[in-house]
Image (cartoon, rainbow, N blue to C red):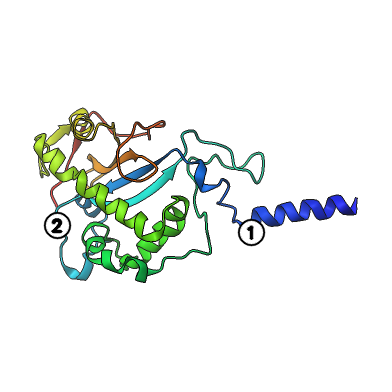
């Protein structure tokens, strides 16, 4: 009986030393989700919580929200049989916090493309640190490769330009078919996106975030094994910024 007790204690110690969120090893994810956010839809929903970095308005361009390893299928957690269903790994290595000296050469690009508009969390480094700790540590990449992959993907498939080329431009009054947005991204990248909408101050639905599945190396779009629920109507706003 005592031997069984020590065996179970050892198993639980291993599980909990990895953290309750680290339910599955990072090498089991199927793809990476590149999440890009439209600043106009962030700010007109959060007028009292939208702050420009350095008090300078950023360019009217999609910004990176994150690069998130994703499972092909959601699964139950391993700690208890009734644990919350998990659709992605997170917090895979608590001993590997962000070291900004490793991405110093990327800082300028990161500030332009992966900044924060939150008034509550105005420190971009803290934002990058959170994304690295929660998602980057599960990506199988080192810190420099992770942030470089996100920057390169955004530059290669510039959503602002893709939509503009399809006649979808930021507008105060114009409304666009959701299908025209999805079709434009699919045609340009070869991969169908998932789209998230939010509501502006007039209770109108608008384009907020675009999610695309990328290969495990973070470089090329791939077919999404599991589409994210969009909750968008057939027609949406694409607000000016």
Q: Residue 167, position in %: x, y? A: 9, 35
Element class at badge 2: loop
Q: Specify the farthest residue to the right.
A: 1
Where is mark 1, residue-wise? 17
Horizontal arrangement in the rendering, residue 64 relative to residue 8 (left or right): left
Horizontal arrangement in the rendering, residue 11 relative to residue 218 (left or right): right
Residue under the point 26% across and 31% down: 233
| Whether residue 21 is situated above or below residue 215 in the rendered picture | below
- Which of disc 2 and disc 1 is earlier in sequence? 1
| Whether residue 40 is situated above or below residue 30 in the rendered picture | below
- Residue 58, by quadrant, is bottom left
- Residue 9, by quadrant, is bottom right
Q: Residue 103, position in %: x, y? A: 33, 65
Residue under the point 22% across and 52% down: 39
Between the C-alphas of marks 1 and 2, the distance is 43 Å
Q: Residue 116, position in %: x, y? A: 28, 61
Task: Give residue 59's mark.
Answer: 2
Question: Cβ–Cβ below 8 Å for labels 1 and 2?
Answer: no
- 200, 209: nearer the viewer: 209
| Whether residue 109 is situated above or below residue 139 in the rendered picture | below
């Amino acid at each position: 009986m005592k031997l069984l007790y020590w065996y179970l204690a050892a198993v639980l110690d291993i599980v909990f030393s990895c953290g309750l969120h680290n339910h599955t090893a990072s090498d089991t994810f199927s793809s990476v989700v590149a999440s890009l956010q439209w600043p106009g839809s962030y700010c007109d929903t959060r007028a009292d919580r939208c702050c420009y970095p350095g008090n300078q308005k950023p360019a009217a361009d999609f910004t990176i929200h994150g690069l998130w390893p994703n499972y092909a299928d959601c699964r139950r957690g391993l700690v208890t049989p009734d644990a919350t269903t998990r659709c992605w790994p997170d917090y895979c290595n608590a001993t590997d916090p962000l070291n900004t000296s490793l991405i110093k050469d990327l800082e300028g690009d990161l500030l332009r493309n992966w900044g924060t508009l939150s008034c509550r969390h105005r420190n971009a480094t803290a934002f990058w640190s959170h994304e690295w700790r929660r998602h980057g540590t599960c990506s199988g990449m080192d810190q420099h490769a992770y942030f470089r992959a996100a920057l390169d993907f955004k530059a290669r498939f510039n959503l602002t330009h893709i939509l503009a080329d399809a006649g979808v431009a930021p507008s105060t009054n114009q409304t666009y078919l959701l299908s025209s947005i999805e079709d434009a991204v699919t045609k340009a990248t070869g991969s169908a996106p998932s789209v998230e909408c939010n509501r502006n101050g007039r209770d109108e639905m608008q384009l907020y975030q675009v999610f695309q599945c990328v290969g495990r190396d973070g470089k090329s779009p791939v077919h999404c094994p599991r589409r994210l629920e969009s909750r968008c109507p057939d027609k949406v706003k694409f607000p000016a910024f």
